[in-house]
Image (cartoon, rainbow, N blue to C red):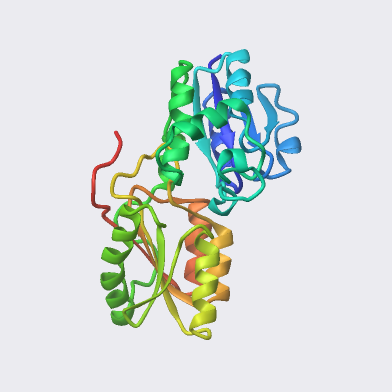
Amino acid sequence: MAKLGVIAGSGRFPFLVVEEARRQGLSVLVAAIREEAEGEWGKAFENDPEVAVHWLALGQLGKLLKLLRRERVSQALMVGQVKHSKIFQRTVPAARRILAARPDWRMLRLLASLPRKNTAALIGGVIQALEQEGIEFLDPTFLLRDLLPQPGVLTRRPPDASEQQDIDYGRPVARQLARLDLGQTIVVRDQAVVAVEAMEGTDETIRRAARLTAGQPLTVIKVSRPDQDMRFDVPVLGGQTLEVCRECRVTALSIDAGRTVLLDRREFLAGADRLKMAVVAHEASGPERS
């Protein structure tokens, strides 16, 4: 039986990927990132002999490579969030403050070779290291294509005139920020950008916007990179973000069709309908990875 390596961060997405892989008859090795992955990994698949869970600290690239070689994993994917705020720390001067956990020599060598230390460069370097070991790195959405929405209004209610103006104004702004690799989310009110995502993530960006506007209705725009590599850092939205939208009076949400994962899609959109929130998927510009 083919064995799939799953490098797991936080959230439900990794669990959904493993569940679907098992439905398709794949044996799975989960390399769970200790600082991010959910503790439920120990119980979720304990009765399935074809799912093995191993815990690794952030920065243990050498250990990851040894594990995948030992278990004869030839294909792997990375799924789930690793918070960008954990990338920069003061605890490891030798790594130029790049990783919260003490990196092993393989990670240190990778860091020293990178001219840039942004998210795309770091994860791209890890992918290259795996590929040099003969491990093919996959797009995780190949298992869950139905979670990628097609263009159009996804909820019962379309954006009203004011929300549509915010979306029309905000999408070009968001795409410019994504092109610069600064973040994928902005929050707009009355055609003014209230908050821009950096390392804090989507939910904290929305909360900051709500504080700045004293609870006024908001429009959230989340986009992919123009050259989005679907193998990593794909935009993902789930129930937790929907709850934040409820708390922060988000009335409209704009996403990229075909490049945004809606976890538990039916439940997400049903919840948006209960909130009378408009969710619309737009055609994404720029090339996609085939």
Q: Residue at x 31, y 75 (%)?
A: 166
In the displayed structure, would residue 92 be above or below residue 104?
below
Q: How many marks?
A: 0
Q: Residue at x 31, y 69 (%)?
A: 170
Residue 42, horizontal then vertical, whole percent: 75, 36
Q: Residue at x 54, y 37 (%)?
A: 17
Q: Decide: is 148 above or below 253.
A: above
175 horizontally vs 66: left or right? left
Which image quadrant: the N terminus? Answer: top right
Q: Classify the position of the C terminus by image quarter.
A: top left
- The answer to whether residue 213 of the structure is visible from this angle is yes
Give percent across and percent down for residue 115: 40, 39
Residue 73 in percent (x, y) is at 55, 18
Q: Is residue 152 visible?
A: no
Q: Position of residue 44 (x, y in %)?
A: 71, 38
Q: Which residue is more in the foreground, 7 or 95?
A: 95
Tell which residue pokes out farthest to the left in this image: 286
Taking 66 as reference, is 287 left or right?
A: left
Please state which of residues 245 and 186 is positioned toward the viewer in this rendering: 186
**Residue nearest the viewer, comparing 147 with 236:** 236
